[in-house]
Image (cartoon, rainbow, N blue to C red):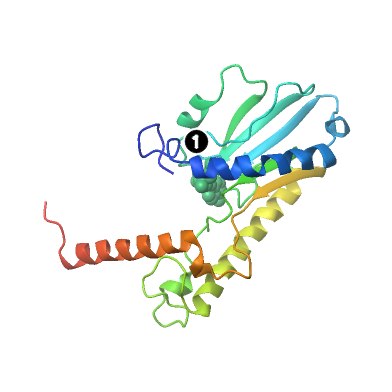
């Protein structure tokens, strides 16, 4: 994600993700009220530990309301390359929680065992950890002919992406299973496509087609006519 606060930064261009978060906020609040009793967790330290995984640099990070009694410690995580400076500058100065940054991939362990009470992650789990190697292998039936997405691609290509997604999600869940306390709560907001709709018919897929073919054209121009400096 582009850091900083300039016109191309994530901070200035994440209102769509913000709407996703706002749309689901009520659901998350209801789930917390129904399933999450802070008093159960209050030990001698009286601290509730919350993690926002994949916080990026923008304004959509998890927000807390003012009237909670225990002390809250919120861990904001993203990849080590994330611009945490921009992120922390945007937190309200008079916040009612303690904030810490946790750099590293959420596909592995980030926290000690049984320490988190609530995990939140929004619009992050669609990020794959790597390009599935079969799609770049010309000798493989899943070869994707240089394209960077699987819209309108053969089933083998889709399956290769699916296998990578499954492996990543499994690693994510395995790590969280160890880090959450018993009866801890997790809210994951993940973009999905209902089975009854063709992936090629949804708006983002059309955007991927356009963006993908533009990138391929640009790459072709650079390969065929290398820039001279
Ligand atoms: C689309 S942004 C969403 C940011 C924010 N949660 C929001 O709703 O606006 C996805 C973020 O997930 C982060 N991310 C992707 N894979 C990650 C990983 N394996 N570990 C930690 N962060 C990751 C990216 O660096 C990026 O900042």
Q: Quadrant of residue 212?
A: bottom left
User: Mark 1, residues whose alpha carbon is within 10 Å: few (<14), some, or many (≥20)?
Assistant: many
Residue at image position (53%, 73%) is: 158
In this orientation, which residue lies closer to the viewer: 146 or 65? 65
Vertical side of 54 occupied by 73: above or below: above
Q: Position of residue 33 (x, y in %)?
A: 81, 37
Tell me the quarter of the picture where residue 61 sits.
Answer: top right
Residue 162 location (% of width, % of height): 58, 69
Left or right relative to 180: residue 202: left
Q: Is residue 78 visible?
A: no
**Residue 173: percent from the left, percent from the top?**
69, 54
Location of the N terminus (image quadrant): top left
Q: Residue 181 placed where, x, y %?
A: 80, 42
Q: Give me the residue at 37% from left, 75% from top.
A: 145
- Residue with the mark numbered 1: 58
Does dot 1 land on a helix, a strand or a loop? loop
Farthest-out residue, right? 40
Counting every numbered tag in the picture gives 1
Question: Does the image show residue 33?
Answer: yes
From the viewer's side, name the closer residue of 128 and 68. 68
Residue at image location 63% in from the left, 39% down from the top: 52
- The residue sitting at the top extreme is 94
**For residue 199, side relative to residue 113 (left or right):** left
CB of residue at label 1: within 8 Å of ligand 1?
yes
Using the image, determine if residue 119 lies above or below residue 193: above
């Amino acid at each position: 994600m582009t850091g900083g606060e300039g016109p191309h930064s994530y901070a200035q261009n994440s209102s769509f993700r913000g709407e996703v978060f706002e749309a689901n906020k009520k659901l998350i609040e209801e789930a917390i009220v129904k399933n999450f009793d802070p008093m159960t967790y209050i030990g001698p330290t009286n601290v509730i530990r919350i993690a926002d995984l994949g916080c990026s640099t923008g304004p959509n990070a998890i927000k807390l309301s003012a009237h909670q009694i225990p002390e809250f410690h919120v861990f904001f995580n993203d990849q080590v390359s994330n611009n945490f400076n921009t992120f922390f500058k945007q937190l309200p100065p008079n916040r009612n929680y303690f904030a810490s940054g946790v750099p590293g991939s959420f596909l592995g362990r980030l926290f000690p065992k049984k320490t988190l009470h609530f995990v939140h992650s929004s619009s992050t789990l669609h990020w794959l950890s790597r390009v599935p190697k079969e799609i770049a292998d010309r000798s493989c039936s899943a070869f994707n002919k240089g394209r960077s997405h699987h819209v309108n691609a053969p089933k083998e290509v889709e399956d290769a992406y699916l296998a990578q997604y499954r492996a990543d999600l499994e690693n994510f869940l395995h790590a969280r299973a160890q880090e959450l306390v018993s009866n801890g709560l997790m809210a994951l907001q993940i973009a999905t496509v209902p089975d009854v709709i063709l992936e090629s018919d949804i708006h983002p897929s059309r955007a991927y087609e356009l963006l993908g073919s533009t990138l391929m054209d640009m790459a072709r121009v650079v390969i065929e006519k290398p820039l001279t400096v």
